Amino acid sequence: MNSSFLYAEKHPLATAKLYPYTSGSGVTGKCQAVLESQGNYTVSDYDDVPEGDCLALGEAVANQPVSVAVDALAWQVYIGGTFPHGLCGQ
């Protein structure tokens, strides 16, 4: 995710209203590179929260916004219900 933050430091981010998601309705979207220069939001700094550090996570939430990454390997075979203990990774 850090590469995304580095990109956002140099390129303002467009809102969903300006650059809406289109493929959910069956309409295939196309990259609109021109919107790269019309974004409203930039990232000026970011920190990584150490795994399992609830205090650091609380501080990050207080400063907002917070991005979360998950290990989605087990989700590739998910069909419903609750994940069995141990499949969620760390």
Image (tube, helix red, strand yellow):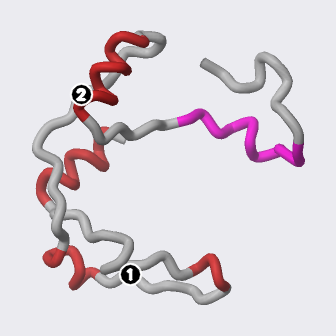
Does 39 appear above or below 45? below
> Residue 65 location, x and y as percent?
30, 41
Outermost residue, bottom side: 27
Q: Is residue 48 above or below residue 22?
A: above
Neighbor class of circle 1 (other Cα within 10 Å; few <14, some 14-19, many 20+) is few
Q: Residue at x 83, y 44 (%)?
A: 78
Nearest to N terminus: mark 1 or mark 2: 1
Location of the C terminus by quadrant is top right
Would residue 57 appear left or right of 23 to someone viewing this image?
left
The residues tagged by marks 1 and 2 sit, at their Cα atoms, a distance apart of 29 Å
Numbered circles on residues, count: 2
Residue 55: horizontal and vertical position, in percent? 35, 10
Is residue 77 on the magenta stretch?
Answer: yes
- Amino acid carrying mark 2 in the image: Asp
Which residue matches tag 2?
Answer: 47
Secondary structure state at the residue bearing disc 2: loop
Q: Write the start and end of the magenta stretch as one range.
A: 70-80
Q: Which residue is mark 1?
A: 31
Q: Give the image location of residue 23, x and y in percent.
A: 58, 79
Residue at 42% from the left image edge and 78% from the top image edge: 20
* x 29%, y 45%: residue: 3
For disc 2, the neighbor class at 10 Å (few under 14, some 14 to 19, many from 20) is: few
Quadrant location of the N terminus?
top left
Which residue corresponds to the image point at 77% horizontal and 17% vertical from the top-left?
86
In the picture, the disc for residue 11 is none
In terms of image quadrants, where is residue 61? top left
Q: Tell me if residue 71 is in the magenta stretch.
A: yes
Q: Secondary structure at mark 1?
A: loop
Give amino acid for label 1: Cys
Relative vertical location of residue 42 with respect to residue 72 in this rendering, above or below: below
Q: Is residue 50 left or right of residue 24?
A: left
